[in-house]
Image (cartoon, rainbow, N blue to C red):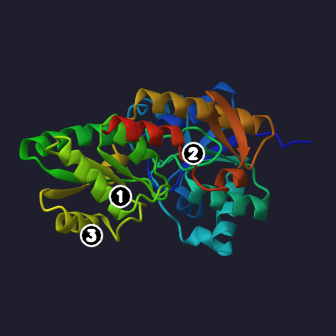
Amino acid sequence: MKNIIKKIAVLTSGGDAPGMNAAIRAVVRSCVYHQVACVGVFKGYEGLIEGDFTALDARSVKNIINKGGTFLKSARSKEFMTPQGREKAYKNLKEQDIDALVVIGGDGTFTGAIVFNQEFDFPIVGLPGTIDNDINGTDFTIGYDTALNTVVEAIDKIRDTAISHSRLFLVEVMGRDAGDIALNAGIGAGAEEILIPELDMGKERLLSSLKRSKKSGKSSSIVVVSEGDQIGKNIFGLASYIQENLEEYECKVTVLGHIQRGGSPSCFDRVLASRLGIGAVDALLAGKHNVMIGLVHNKVVSIDFQKSLEGSNKIDTDLIRVADIISI
């Protein structure tokens, strides 16, 4: 017999991503719709340990769908990594009569949820909230689309100065070990080369490509580099290498950094977050737990937490071909 869910808590954990507020909003209003109490947890898993809870209703989440970041705050909790910390978190949940938990975050958030569920058999459902798009079992993560648009807009502006001064710009983007942001933003911004962790291009091939670009009449170039790419020790070392071997280029570096995690979420991310947030509450009320809610072929699906963390990021080989063809 499945437990009756009367109160659901929601938290955000790990790196923030545009659309997290929209996801919280959807969870809260879905709870209201189903006449289930909802509680917000501040500062992620740290808030569970500290008992930093607040009751939420439909009006508590008004005017946040368009806001970046997360109004519940986020944190990485070292104490939650200990059995004692997780024991405190469980006691606080039980003292507040909370029956289930929705966690919004990335792989670290899901890893914590798996361990917590194994120890206490506590119903948890996860929503993939990360700009990296590196979670298996969903075509898109919350925040990824907004980050793409932010990167493309930034590169468009960098290209203006690259053209004006006939320069080569290396632009580093986020993504950790996943090249989704670099590859898609690079295509969208018309980059001459795109360096991603999944494809080891090698320094010599990069130099050959840049030489061909110069010979073809290009006076400026943009190279998009994923932060996880290992072609150089870091993007500044790569820039020095290019400058030493291609004196005809004036090479500059731009690291976009945390600008990619901020800003108002795109319409796509707002809709995605809303669909997944409602899917999370639906799953809990249907007796499902220890699962992530994702989007596959435009359908909301649930996948076991463990499966969402398995395997390496698979890049779309068709996109690599597109990038090669349109950059000539």
In the image, residue 151 above or below residue 207: above
Q: Where is mark 3, residue-wise?
A: 237
Where is residue 81 drawn, in percent x and y? 61, 70
Q: Tell me the quarter of the image containing the N terminus.
A: top right
Classify 10 Å Cα crowding around label 2: few (below 14), some (14-19), many (20 and above): many
Mark 3 surroundings within 10 Å by alpha-carbon count, few (fewer than 14), some (14 through 19), many (20 or more): few
Of helix, strand and loop, which one carries label 3? helix
Which amino acid does the dot numbered 2 rest on?
Pro
Mark sitting earlier along the chain (2/1): 2
Q: What amino acid is found at the position of numbered circle 3 in the picture? A: Gly
For the residues labelled 2 and 1, say whether their Cβ atoms are less than 8 Å apart.
no
Spatial CA distance of label 2 from label 1 is: 36 Å
Residue receiving disc 1: 205
Q: Is residue 148 in view from this perspective?
A: no
**Residue at label 2?**
128
Residue that appears at 68% across and 73% down: 83
Q: Secondary structure at mark 1?
A: helix
> Callout 1, which amino acid?
Arg
Tell me what residue is drawn at x 73 percent, y 36 percent.
Answer: 283
Q: Nearer the viewer, mark 2 or mark 1?
A: 1
Looking at the image, can residue 66 be seen? yes
